[in-house]
C-alpha cells in the first residue's frame, strides 16, 4: 500500500491533466473527442499547413473541426495526443465567376456566410445546402446533405475542385473526376485524407422559391406512394409525429422572381427563453413519464402546423402557407433576432440517422411503426421528443465511395432511385445519466433496422454502437472500403487523421 499510493496519485494526476475534451455544439458533457492535447484556432491556409507539419514532427494526430455540429464522440481517434485545428477563422470567399458559375471558399466558410456573400451579388448555392452555422468543408468531409430526390443535394455534389493538406503536410489539389478513385474518395473522405482547406464550389443566379406544408394521416405515408410525393420537388421531406400518428409533408420549388414580394425567412432551431424553459421542464419529466412526452408532442405538433417563417423585412410572423422568398432564406434561414437555438438554452439531444433505398421506404417506416406498437402493447407510449418530430429526408443518387446515397454496391439493393433517411433526434435529459424514456427501445430500433434492411449510417449522427452494427452487418460496400483505404494509404500513410469512424469501418 505504501508503495502503491504515490503511483496511484501520480497516475490520477496525469490522467486528470490530460483529459481535455473537445465538445460538440451541445457543449460540456457532449464530447466530439474525449481527450485532446490542444485546440488551435487556425488563421490561414498556410497556418493550417504549418500546424499539421508541426504535429506530424511531434508525433501527434490531427483532426480539423468547423463548428462541431455533430453528435457523438466520433470525431477523433481515442489517442489523447491529438491536435484539433479549428477552421472558423479561415473563411475567405473569393473569385466569384458568374460566367462559369463558380466561387472559391476556404475551410471555415459556413452556409450562412456563403449565402450572404452570394445573395449580395445576385447568386446562390442552389440546393447543396445543409444548415446555417455549419462549414461546407465539414459537410463535404462527412457526406452531409439536404433532402431531395430531384436535385443534387449532397454538399459534395457542388464541389468542382478541392485542396487538401495530407498526412505528409503537403497541399494536394484535386479536380472533379468521377472516374478517378482519388476524387471518389475525397468526395466523402470522413476527414481521413487530411484537412480540406479550400474548395471551388458551383453557384447559380439567385432565385426565389416557395415552401408549402400539408398534414397527412400516418396511413397516407405508410401506405402511400412516397417516391411520387417526394420526387417532383426540388426539396421535400416529412416530419413524423408518432404519438399523433401524423406527418407534416413539406415541399419547396422554384418561383418566378416577380411572383410575390414576400421575403420569407425560415427558423428551424431557435426559440424564446420562456418557450425553451417550458419545453425543457416537460421533457425532463418525460424521462420517467410518457404522459409528459405525449403532451410535448401535442404542443410541438400544433406549433409545427404553422409556417416556421417570418417576413425578413419586418420580422413579422408569416401565418399562411405557401411561403415565398429567396432561395437560402426559405430553404435554410437562420435565427430570429430575439431567439437562440435550443442548444444554447441547455436542451441537448441524441440522434440516429440511417439511409435506406427509397424502394424500401414503406417497408422501413412500417417496421418502425410495428416497433412503436409493440411498445404500446406493453403500455409504453413512444413519442417524438424533438422540436420538429422525426425527420424523414431523401437523397438523390450521387456516386462516390463512402457517401450515403451512392449506388452499384454489393448489397444488391437498388439505390439507383435514391435514398430515404430516417433521422430520429430525441431529447437527452440532464438527469439519469442522459438516459431517455424507455432507453433500451432506441438501441433495439437501431439493431432491427441495421440487421433487417440495406442501409447506411450518416457519418456524424450516430453512436459508435451504430457504426459497429453497420460494420458487423457489412452495410458499407467492401469493394468501396478497399478502394477508399488504398487512397487513404497514399494520402495519410501514418494515420495522422484517423478517427473512431475510420477505425470501426476498417480503413486502418
Ligand atoms: C442543427 C444541425 C442540423 C444538421 N442538419 C443536417 C442535415 O440536414 N443534413 C446533414 O446531412 N447533416 C446535418 N447536420 C450534420 C452536419 O452537417 C455535419 O455534422 C457536419 O459535418 C458539421 O460540420 P461542422 O463544420 O460543424 O464540422 P465539425 O462538426 O466540426 O466536424 C465534423 C467532422 O468533419 C471533420 N471535418 C470538419 N472540417 C473538416 C475539414 N475542413 N477537413 C477535413 N475534415 C473536416 C471533423 O474532423 C469531424 O470528423 C446537422 C447538424 C446540426 C448540429
Ligand atoms: C478559439 O476560438 C473560440 C471560438 O471563437 C474561442 O472560444 C477560443 O477561446 C479560441 N481559442 C483561443 C486559444 O484563442
Ligand atoms: C454559430 O456557432 C457559434 C459557435 O461555434 C456560436 O457562437 C454562434 O452564436 C453561432 N451563430 C449563429 C448565428 O447561430
Image (cartoon, rainbow, N blue to C red):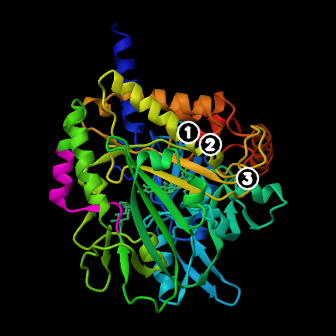
Query: In what quadrant does ligand 2 lie?
Result: bottom left
User: Up-down: is 339 above or below 329?
Assistant: above
Residue 461 in the figure: left or right of residue 430: right
Residue 5 in the figure: left or right of residue 480: left
Return the x and y of residue 349 as percentages of the image width and height: 35, 45
Return the x and y of residue 292 as percentages of the image width and height: 20, 38
Element on which disc 3 rests: loop
Q: CA distance from mark 1 to mark 3?
A: 17 Å
Q: Residues within 10 Å of mark 1 (few under 14, many from 20)?
A: many
Stretch of the chain drawn in magenta:
267-281
Compare marks 1 and 3 and give the one earlier in the sequence.
Answer: 1
Q: CA distance from mark 3 to mark 2?
A: 12 Å
Mark 3, residue position:
416
Residue at the image point whose x is 19% and y is 36% from the top? 285
Closer to us: 81 or 315: 315
Proximity of marks 1 and 2: CB atoms separated by less than 8 Å: yes
Q: Residues within 10 Å of mark 3 (few under 14, many from 20)?
A: some
Residue 38 in the figure: left or right of residue 231: left
Mark 2, residue position:
360
User: Up-down: is 425 above or below 158?
Assistant: above
Mark 1, residue position:
364
Return the x and y of residue 73 as percentages of the image width and height: 47, 40
Element on which disc 1 rests: helix
Closer to us: 38 or 110: 110
Closer to us: 257 or 52: 257
Q: Residue 27: say if magenta.
A: no
**Which quarter of the figure has residue 478?**
top right
Residue at the image point whose x is 62% and y is 44% from the top? 59
Direction right: furthest residue: 179
Element on which disc 2 rests: helix
Residue 331 in the figure: left or right of residue 292: right
Amino acid at each position: 500500500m505504501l508503495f502503491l499510493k504515490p503511483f496511484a496519485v501520480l497516475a490520477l494526476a496525469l490522467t486528470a491533466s490530460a483529459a481535455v475534451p473537445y465538445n460538440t455544439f451541445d457543449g460540456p458533457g457532449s464530447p466530439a473527442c474525449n481527450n485532446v492535447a490542444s485546440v488551435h484556432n487556425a488563421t490561414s491556409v498556410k497556418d493550417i499547413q504549418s500546424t499539421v507539419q508541426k504535429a506530424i514532427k511531434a508525433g501527434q494526430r490531427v483532426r480539423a473541426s468547423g463548428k462541431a455540429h455533430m453528435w457523438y464522440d466520433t470525431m477523433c481517434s481515442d489517442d489523447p495526443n491529438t491536435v484539433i485545428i479549428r477552421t472558423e477563422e479561415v473563411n475567405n470567399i473569393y473569385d466569384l465567376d458568374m460566367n462559369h458559375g463558380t466561387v472559391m471558399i476556404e475551410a471555415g466558410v459556413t452556409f450562412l456566410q456563403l449565402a450572404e456573400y452570394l445573395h449580395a451579388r445576385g447568386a446562390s448555392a442552389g440546393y447543396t445546402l445543409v444548415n446555417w452555422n455549419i462549414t461546407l468543408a465539414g459537410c463535404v468531409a462527412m457526406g452531409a446533405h439536404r433532402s431531395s430526390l430531384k436535385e443534387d443535394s449532397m454538399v459534395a455534389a457542388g464541389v468542382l475542385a478541392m485542396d487538401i493538406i495530407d498526412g505528409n503536410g503537403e497541399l494536394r489539389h484535386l479536380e472533379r473526376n468521377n472516374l478517378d478513385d482519388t476524387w471518389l474518395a475525397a468526395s466523402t473522405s470522413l476527414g481521413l485524407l487530411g484537412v480540406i482547406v479550400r474548395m471551388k464550389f458551383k453557384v447559380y443566379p439567385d432565385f426565389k422559391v416557395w415552401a408549402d406544408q400539408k398534414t397527412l394521416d400516418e396511413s397516407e405515408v405508410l401506405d402511400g406512394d412516397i417516391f411520387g410525393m417526394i420526387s417532383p420537388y426540388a426539396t421535400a421531406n416529412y416530419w413524423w409525429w408518432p404519438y399523433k400518428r401524423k406527418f407534416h409533408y413539406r415541399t419547396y420549388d422554384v418561383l418566378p422572381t416577380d411572383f410575390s414580394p414576400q421575403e420569407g425567412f425560415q427558423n428551424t432551431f431557435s426559440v424564446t427563453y420562456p418557450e425553451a424553459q417550458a419545453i425543457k421542464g416537460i421533457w425532463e419529466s418525460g424521462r420517467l413519464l410518457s404522459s409528459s412526452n405525449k403532451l410535448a408532442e401535442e404542443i410541438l405538433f400544433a406549433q409545427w402546423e404553422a409556417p416556421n417563417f417570418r417576413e425578413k423585412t419586418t420580422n413579422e410572423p408569416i401565418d399562411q402557407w405557401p411561403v415565398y422568398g429567396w432561395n437560402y432564406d426559405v430553404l435554410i434561414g437562420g435565427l430570429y433576432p430575439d431567439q437562440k437555438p435550443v442548444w444554447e438554452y441547455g436542451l441537448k439531444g441524441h440522434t440516429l440517422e440511417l439511409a435506406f433505398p427509397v424502394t424500401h421506404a414503406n417497408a422501413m417506416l412500417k417496421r418502425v411503426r410495428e416497433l412503436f406498437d409493440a411498445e404500446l402493447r406493453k403500455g409504453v407510449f413512444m413519442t417524438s421528443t424533438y422540436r420538429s418530430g422525426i425527420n424523414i429526408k431523401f437523397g438523390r443518387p450521387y456516386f462516390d465511395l463512402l457517401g450515403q446515397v451512392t449506388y452499384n454496391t454489393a448489397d444488391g439493393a437498388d439505390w439507383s432511385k435514391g435514398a430515404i433517411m430516417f433521422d430520429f433526434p430525441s431529447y437527452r435529459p440532464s438527469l439519469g445519466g442522459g438516459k431517455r424514456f424507455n432507453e433500451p427501445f432506441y438501441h433495439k430500433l437501431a439493431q432491427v433496422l441495421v440487421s433487417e434492411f440495406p442501409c447506411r449510417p450518416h457519418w456524424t449522427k450516430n453512436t459508435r454502437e451504430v457504426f459497429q452494427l453497420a460494420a458487423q452487418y457489412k452495410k458499407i460496400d467492401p469493394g468501396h472500403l478497399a478502394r477508399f483505404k488504398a487512397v487513404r494509404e497514399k494520402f495519410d500513410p501514418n494515420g495522422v487523421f484517423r478517427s473512431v469512424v475510420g477505425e470501426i469501418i476498417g480503413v486502418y
